[in-house]
Amino acid sequence: MNYKAITFSCQDKDSVQKFLELPGRLYSKKELMQQPEEERKILEGTHVLSHYFTVFPLLVLNEQNVPVSRAALTVYPEDTDAYLGFFESENDPKAASLLIKEAEKIAVSQNCTKITGPIDASFWIRYRFKRNCFDLSYTGEPYNKDYYAALWQKAGFEIAERYYSNHYRKVKPSDKNSLFSARLAQKRQEGYRIESPSKDTFDKTLIEVYELLIELYQSFPAYKRISRDEFVSLYSYLKLLIRYPMVKMAYYQGKAVGFFISIPDYGNAVYGKLSLPDYLRILRIRTMPKSYVMLYMGIDAAHHGLGKALAESIKEELQTAGVPSVGALIRHGNINKDYFHELIDYEYEYVLLRKSLV
């Protein structure tokens, strides 16, 4: 089979449509976690973060002019790393290699010395490849075909970062952890307030989370600072998905110093264009969740031990709810990877890859 690689602009409506339609051919309806409207905005340069970067979309077409592989290379001014994301492909090393070689040419022309990925344009959108447990997925997870990482490694990429998600069984009354419960009691005695926001205070809470994580996440790969308004625009949707008892904020002397954000696991119900039945399904899940996803956690480094206290407060809520949960996307080496290890059923694995162009 002969292939050709092309780059295209947002004015090329046919190529844009081919780019957007490829995931629907590769995944079953149950697997698909695509956000086509967000992808379209990235391609058109109208996304809320588009002013930070330049995107070069790529397609590999077969002899029938049908797309078999796609990606988008993102370049930031004054950054020698280029970022390859929105990758989808048939299990064909020849097609994937051709796509990646084309991305490398563009990266070199933009004075980049490395390509890191998968990163869908921004740290704030989506990144990482999943490596195992492909029969299981959860809301917020970077889901992909099981051969994607191997295709990249065949093209010369190496693993740069590892991440894990822990699946926790239901918490039973007998699941006591004296260290964590003591730490929660200690922090409360020291004057910390650990509480959940309400519908009326969530907008304020989101700003407090921004002010914490904009500093705490700086060491993460591909991190780029964004404005408060941009952050709120990206994450205000959480207000529609969360159950407030499963969000915890920690305050000390009136200042937010930690957060723990969990949402019900909606599977892929929240992705794509939503119909009335989709909204009703989301409402049912929100009313009676069967599991939770612990998506985001951050602690001001000056407040030692607060992470265990926040985790214990969430564990208490999970025991009351009587459902399992997932501790999502923990960077290798982070201490919270081993929180409540006795409750872990199994572990998901993810990678970020990098290739030097020098």
Image (cartoon, rainbow, N blue to C red):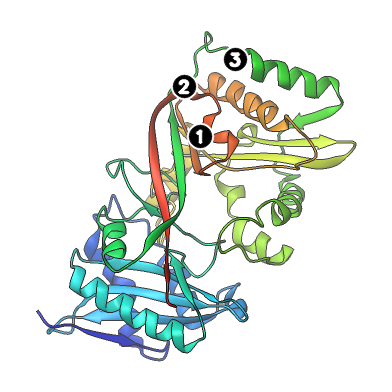
Q: CA distance from mark 3 to mark 1?
A: 29 Å
The residue singled out by tag 3 in the image is 177
Which of 44/130 is in front? 130
Q: Which mark is residue 148?
A: none
Q: Position of residue 246 (x, y in %)?
A: 61, 33
Of marks 3 and 1, the one in the foreground:
3
The residue singled out by tag 2 in the image is 343
Q: Is residue 254 left or right of residue 243?
A: right
Q: Quadrant of residue 155?
A: bottom left
- Which secondary structure lies at badge 3? loop
Q: CA distance from mark 2 to mark 3?
A: 11 Å
Q: Earlier in the sequence, mark 2 or mark 3?
A: 3
Q: Position of residue 241 (x, y in %)?
A: 55, 45
Q: Position of residue 128 (x, y in %)?
A: 43, 56
Residue 151 vertical position relative to residue 166 in the rendered view, above or below: below
Tag 2 near tag 1, CB within 8 Å: no
Of marks 2 and 1, the one in the foreground:
2
* Count of picture labels: 3
Q: Quadrant of residue 247?
A: top right
Furthest-front residue in this view? 358
Report the amino acid beneath label 2: Leu
Tag 2 near tag 3, CB within 8 Å: no
**Label 1 crowd bin: few (<14), some (14–19), many (20+), radius 10 Å:** few
Query: What residue is at 46 percent from the left and 59 percent from the top?
Result: 127
**Label 3 crowd bin: few (<14), some (14–19), many (20+), radius 10 Å:** few
The residue singled out by tag 1 in the image is 287
